[in-house]
Amino acid sequence: MSIELEIQDGSPHWWNSSDVWVVPGNDPSGSPGQPIAGQTAYLWGRVHNNGSTFANSAQVNFYWSNPATGVLRSNSTFIGASFVDLDPGETQEVLCLTPWMPTIVNDGHECIVAEVIHVADPLPSPLPDAFDPPAYLQIAQRNLSVLSMKTSMMILPIELAASPREKKSLEVMLEFGEEIDRKSIRQLGMGKIEYTKKPIVKAELTMDRGCGKINTKHCCCHLRVDLAPGTSQAVYLKVDPCNLKPGVYIPINVIAREGDKIVGGITFIVIRSEEE
């Protein structure tokens, strides 16, 4: 007899969980969509009890963090908690009763984390600083957002951070991603939009936030970043929409690896803005 709680991740890109989503606006039962900086939103998490025992009053915690390839408790903000009772084999959608106000920083491109805690299915004590969803079924992360572009290049800061007691040596990589599942597309409030494999945008990683043009012959898809304990460093993703057309999208993944382990990632779904 056991309780086995889970908020499913988005494997293989585990930071793209469809078990965590946002409903923008003042109605938590409204349609899912992209958070809007400065406007109220509500968070939801889908919790599963894969065990054979009733789970009474499991606590579901919700956090937000600036977009980063490795999300830490020490640089995330607690939003609120809710409680749920789950029969064996039951799944429930849980609302964070505390409304969330996405900040103007990063134009609302925040990362969301949800975790479920129960005394019969505990997380480690003390809690590690890294949320580390691949290591814990009870934790999931949604680091997936829409990048709506006009005709000019956009530059996005992406934070890398080390826990206070650990140094980090990271390889940060850029890749054009595979098709996103339709559930995640709907949760972002996207209408009928199609995936394309064609290289219709340019992108690069850089340590320089300057707005120089992307040189496709010499653009950077790999960076090595060393972090002292308790420090952070921004790298910059430059995206040029080039031949991007309305009605299509292409995902861009930024992935951080430490040795052989992927320690974090963030995905941007790049689309053409309807406003020109």
Image: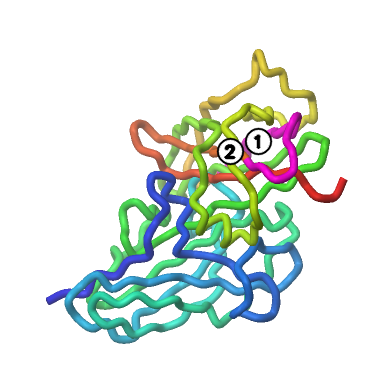
Q: Is residue 26 left or right of residue 222?
A: right
Stretch in magenta = 232-249
Q: Quarter holding the N terminus? A: bottom left
Q: Earlier in the sequence, mark 1 or mark 2?
A: 1
In the rendered structure, which amino acid carries the disc numbered 1? Leu
Q: Residues within 10 Å of mark 2 (few under 14, many from 20)?
A: many
Which residue type carries mark 2?
Answer: Ile
Mark 1 and mark 2: Cα distance apart in space: 10 Å
Q: Secondary structure at mark 1?
A: strand
Relative horizontal placement of residue 84, taking residue 23 as reference (left or right): left
| Residue 252, numbered circle | 2
Is 5 within the magenta? Answer: no
**Rendered position, 35 above or below 197:** below
The label shown at residue 100 is: none
Q: Position of residue 258 (x, y in %)?
A: 40, 35
Q: Mark 1, mark 2: which one is toward the viewer?
A: 2
Q: Specify the quadrant that holds the C terminus.
A: top right
Q: How many marks?
A: 2
**Is residue 243 a member of the stretch shown in magenta?**
yes
Residue 182 horizontal/vertical position (percent): 52, 54
Left or right: residue 10 versus residue 55 is right
Name the residue at the left extreme: 1
Q: Which residue is at the front of the view, 201 or 126?
A: 201
Q: Which residue is mark 1?
A: 237
Are circles 1 and 2 on residues that touch, CB within 8 Å? yes
Q: Is residue 126 above or below residue 61?
A: above
Between residues 1 and 178, which one lies in front from this camera angle? 178
Measuring 23% from the left and 78% from the top, which residue is drawn there? Answer: 88
Which residue shows up at 28% across the image and 73% down it? 49
Give the prevailing secondary structure in the magenta stretch.
Answer: strand
